[in-house]
Image (spheres, rainbow, N blue to C red):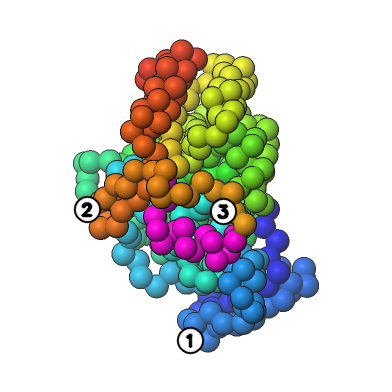
Amino acid sequence: MFIPKRVIFEENALNYELGKNLLKRFKNENIDILYSKNGRITGIPGKDNRQMYIEGKNTLVVGVRKTLNFESCKPSAHYQLPIVSGCMGMCEYCYLNTQMGKKPYIKIHANIEEILDKAGEYIESRKPEITIFEGAATSDPIPVETYSEALKKSIEYFGENQNSLFRFVTKYTDVDDLLNLKHNGRTTIRFSINTKDVITRFEHRTPSLEERLKAAKKIGESGYNLGFIIAPVFIYPSWEKDYYDVLENIYDNFKGINLKFEVISHRFTKRAKENILTIYSNTLLPMEEELRKFKFGQFGYGKYIYKDEELNYMKDFFKKNIIKLFGEESINYII
Ligand code: SF4
């Protein structure tokens, strides 16, 4: 659970029940409270990039989602459900490091009901097709769930709606409040996992692999659709043994639970590398352009992926071992 160092309330958030309740709660908990009158978020300190980053990661903003147009979320879903943005985690490779600005605060929305009403309009407009919403496109929503209750409301909303499905991904483990919700099998929760080595080196302020697997097991036993995203996959001296250990650990502990796997090899953009180096100047992330292959991406900028030979070997490794342990139909994709 995320305990912020400061909370900034957008003034209009206090027109909503959730905003009022959170103000009371944070006052009782003696957490620094600031207000934003014009929608501009100010008051997060920091003299250099690293300090601003850390202070941003310790700041919660309680706001109101003004634009209710949802971004598309291809290929895994139709729309991003804008419930939370930002994340308390400090994963060195995180895509949010290039997306969230210099002070990457975490923002929740007091008008979750309005957001879900808008989701309802999207669902209606696409009927009878099923509309899929992704709840973690710009965040990890679990650490702030105790404040936002956005997952709880979304899971039950989509649970009742036959023409929609909901999905989100997390590295966090505070899932107990989700276990008894009426999800009706319409929500898929994926846990992002990695080897112990990668977690220790790069995924700061996140739970251990064992804790993630424990939480995933509870989710699987509660009837949710369950998946694992193994990402980003790094090639390092003991990678094969380490990733095989992860797969075997899952095999041993998830008997009888249907699982899906997504596997994503490490990649980076030039811009991400520059941003990462301003915050983590001593990072051990492998980002030597000359050891990678440059590939133009669909969004107009290129990324550095592993070279063909390594990448194909890695893909074969996961394909072979996931099929051996979990069956062919458990693979969603390996890239
Ligand atoms: S947990 Fe996920 S969203 Fe949060 S910092 Fe790590 S990679 Fe980014």
Q: Say the numbered circle drawn on residue 38.
A: 1
**At which x and y percent is residue 102?**
52, 71
Q: Nearer the viewer, mark 2 or mark 1?
A: 1
Q: Secondary structure at mark 2?
A: helix
Residue type indicated by callout 2 = Ser
Q: CA distance from mark 2 to mark 1?
A: 33 Å
Q: Nearer the viewer, mark 3 or mark 1?
A: 3
The answer to whether residue 47 is magenta is no
Instruction: Sort mark 2 into few (<14), some (14-19) or many (20+) by Cα contacts within 10 Å.
Output: few
Q: Earlier in the sequence, mark 3 or mark 1?
A: 1
Q: CA distance from mark 3 to mark 2?
A: 39 Å
**At which x and y percent is residue 322?**
46, 20
**At which x and y percent is residue 279?**
58, 64
Residue 299 shown left or right of residue 226 in the figure: left
Q: Earlier in the sequence, mark 2 or mark 1?
A: 1
Residue 28 shown left or right of residue 137 in the figure: right
Q: Say the numbered circle drawn on residue 125.
A: 2
In the image as oriented, which residue stretches furthest toward the bottom?
Answer: 37
Q: Earlier in the sequence, mark 3 or mark 2?
A: 3
**Can you say whether 280 is above or below 193 in the image?**
below
Q: What span is colored magenta in the figure?
A: 267-281
Main SS, magenta region, reads helix
In the image as oriented, which residue stretches furthest toward the top?
Answer: 324
Q: Nearer the viewer, mark 3 or mark 2?
A: 3
**At which x and y percent is residue 259?**
47, 25
